[in-house]
Image: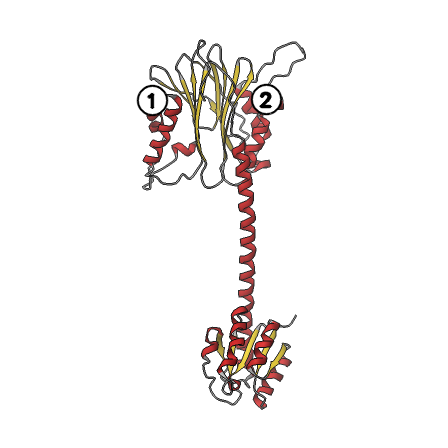
Amino acid sequence: MPDKILLAQKNNPTADHLYNLLRDEGYFILKAGDITETARMLGERPDLLLFDTEIASRQNPDQWTPMILRCRDNPLPCVLFSSNGRKPAPIKALSPWITDTLQSPINPREVQYKITTQLTIHRLQYELTLAQRMLANKQTELDEYRRSAAQIQRALLPEHLPALENLKFAWRFIPCERIGGDLFNIMRLTNDTVMVYLLDVSGHGVSAAMITVSVFQNLSPTSGRLFRAHSGSNKPLQCLAPTEILQQLDREYPFERFGKFFTIACLLLHTPTGKLQFSSAGHPPPLCIRSDGSCELLSSGGSIIGTGAKVPFEQGEVTLEQGDRIFLYSDGIIEHSTPQGEMFGIPRLYHKLQLQKKRELAAACEKTIETLHSFGQETAFKDDITLLGIEYLGNDKTPSES
C-alpha cells in the first residue's frame, strides 16, 4: 500500500507542480486548502504532512486549535514549504511536529530525498512503538506465568510434617525476586523410615520451577518409584537407597531432554536406630553437628543430575545419637556475598551453626539467617535461600515441635 501524504497547500502553480510530482512518484495524496480542512483530513491518519506556510498567514489564530489537537493525538512528521518561493517561515503552533523544510518544492531531487527520509523515519518509529507494545504485552504475560509458577512452587513446600516422636524439624525458606528452583520435602515412607531431600535446579524462571514440580511428583511416595519391587504381597515395603534414587533421577532427567541440571541431597533415616544413609548429586554436603559440638560433613555422592556421568554415586552412613542435628542448605546461602564480593562460604556457615547448638532448632535456623543478612549488609538475595534442620531426639522423646 502506498504511503499516504496530506498536502496542505495554497492553490498556485508551485503547489500544483508539487502535487503532480508526488502523484507521479506513486504516493497516495490527500489535499487540503486551509487549516480547518487540514485538521479534518488529519483524521485520515496520513503518514506525512506537507504544510504550505502560505495558507497560515491569512488564518484566524483560533483556527489552529483543532489542528494542534489532531497533531497531539497522532504525531506525524511535518515538512514545511512555501508555494510562493519564500523561505518557509517557522510556525509556532506546529513547531513540535516540524521535522524538515523544503527550500525548493519544485526540485524533484530535494523533494524525493526529504520525503523518503521522513517516511522512513516515521515507519521505523511506528515499528519500534509496535515492537515495544508487543514486548510489553509479552512481559505482562511472562510475569503472569512467573507468578503462577511461583505459586505452584511455594505450594510444594511441606505444610504438615510426619508425626514422629523422636525428630524435630525446622527450616527457613526465602525466595529471591526471581523464581528459583529450590525445593525440599520430608516424607514418612514407612513406619520407621523418613526420607528428606533438598534440590536446586539450575537457573531461574518458569522452566526451573517446572522441573521442581516434575521432580516433586517423581519423588512422591505415591509414585511407586521410591520402593523396591518384589513379588511377595505380604512382604514389607523396602525403600530404595539414596544412591539408587539419584541414579534413577540421573537417567530420567538428562540435560539433552530438559535443558536443565539440578543438584540434590538425599537422606534416608531409620528413626528407631538413628541410622542415616545419605548421598548428594553435586549439592553442597549436608552437615552433621553432634550433641557435643563436633562437626561432620556428609560428603558422599556424585555428579550433578543431568550430566549422565558413568561414575556411580557413593553412599555414606552415620548413626545419630540423641541431640545430634543434620542441616541441609542450598548454595544461595554459601554464595551470598557482601557488596565487595566476599562470599559467606561453607566454613562460615558451619561455624555459625555450631555456635547455635544450645538454641532450639528453629531459633538456630532463624539466627543463622539473621547472620547471613548482616554479613551481606542487607543486600538482596540473588538466589533462593533454604536452610533445613533435623534434630534426632532418641527413642523416648515427646512429640516433636515443628
The residue at the point 38 percent across, 32 percent down is 334
Q: What is the x, y in percent for residue 295?
A: 36, 19
Q: If the image is split into quadrants, where does the N terminus sit?
A: bottom right
Q: Residue at x 56, y 53 (%)?
A: 137
Residue labelled with disc 2: 221
What amino acid type should be assigned to the residue bearing mark 1? Gln
Q: Residue 285, can we see it? A: no
Q: Which residue is mark 1?
A: 354
Residue at the outermost front position: 62
Quarter of the image for residue 44 reads bottom right
Q: Is residue 238 above or below residue 352?
A: above
For this rendering, which residue is in front, 61 or 170?
A: 61
Query: Which x, y percent locates residue 346?
Result: 37, 28
Which quadrant is the C terminus positioned in? top left
Do we see residue 340 in this rendering?
Answer: yes
Secondary structure beneath label 2: helix
Q: Position of residue 107 (x, y in %)?
A: 54, 85
Total numbered labels placed on residues in the image: 2
Sequence-first disc among 1 and 2: 2
Q: CA distance from mark 1 to mark 2?
A: 33 Å
Left or right of 201? Residue 370 is: left
Q: Position of residue 176 (x, y in %)?
A: 44, 38
Find numbered disc 1 in the image and state the secondary structure of the residue it sits on: helix
Q: Residues within 10 Å of mark 1 (few under 14, many from 20)?
A: some
* 158 up-or-down from 96: above or below: above
